[in-house]
Image (cartoon, helix red, strand yellow):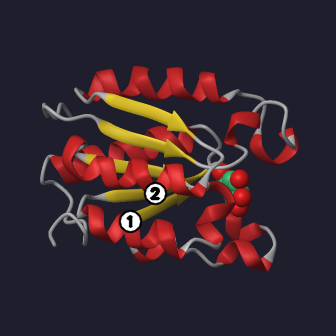
Amino acid sequence: MHVPTAKPVYVLNGPNLNMLGLREPSIYGHETLADVEARVHRHAEKLGLRVEFRQTNYEGELVTWIQEARDKACGILLNAGALTHTSVAVLDALNAAELPAIEVHLSNVFRREAFRHQSYVSLAAVGVICGFGPASYTLALDGLASILAGKTAGTKASA
Ligand code: DHK
């Protein structure tokens, strides 16, 4: 699939994802965030998409980037880290962005602690990909590309 679009996909990462590779490798794997970013760029190129890839440890900065995406992006892939489970502000920003958003996690959050089963991000996301390690990001990009090409009727994309 090739989806030419003028605007990039914003791939946004929240707290502690800068620690990938060092952080609990039995859960999050050995790839660094730079490795994941390179993987995402390679895959995006095949899909004809451009990517703006960022990470922050700050909730407010993540909210600001989601607000920015409203005008500057064609869609959002979001691994909000722990903010997934706590942040109404991130949820509100996603709803305000009015863009197709896909929730991403490296780990299968449903095999983990009960507090990770709750997601505010899910309330605004077209779909969720979790449990595939770094491949969660490229699978999510495939899903977003399909939505942007009009081949998948995402709930938020059609809103
Ligand atoms: C990353 C985190 O930092 C956690 O707080 C989430 C997610 C899961 C992940 O699997 O990518 O609970």
Q: Dividing the image into four quarters, tell me where ligand 1 lies.
A: bottom right
Q: Earlier in the sequence, mark 1 or mark 2?
A: 2
Secondary structure type for disc 2: helix
Rendered-image quadrant of the C terminus = bottom left
Query: Looking at the image, do the residues carrying marks 1 and 2 touch, with CB atoms under 8 Å apart?
Result: yes
Question: Residue shown at 58%/57% (left/top)?
Answer: 59
Q: Position of residue 18 (x, y in %)?
A: 69, 35
How many numbered marks are there? Answer: 2
The three-letter amino acid code for the residue at tag 2 is Val
- How many residues crowd around disc 1 within 10 Å: few (fewer than 14), some, or many (20 or more)? many
Q: CB at mark 1 closer than 8 A to ligand 1?
A: no
Answer with left or right where residue 151 lies relative to residue 28.
left
Quadrant in the rendering for residue 130: bottom right
Secondary structure type for disc 1: helix
Answer with left or right where residue 45 lies relative to residue 30.
left
Answer with left or right where residue 121 lies relative to residue 117.
left
Question: Residue shown at 20%/63% (left/top)?
Answer: 157
* Residue 126 showing in the rendered view: no
Q: Nearer the viewer, residue 92 or 124?
A: 92
Instruction: List the residue tagged with mark 2.
Output: 63
Q: Position of residue 13 (x, y in %)?
A: 56, 45
* Residue 155 showing in the rendered view: yes
- How many residues crowd around disc 2 within 10 Å: few (fewer than 14), some, or many (20 or more)? some
Instruction: List the residue tagged with mark 1.
Output: 93
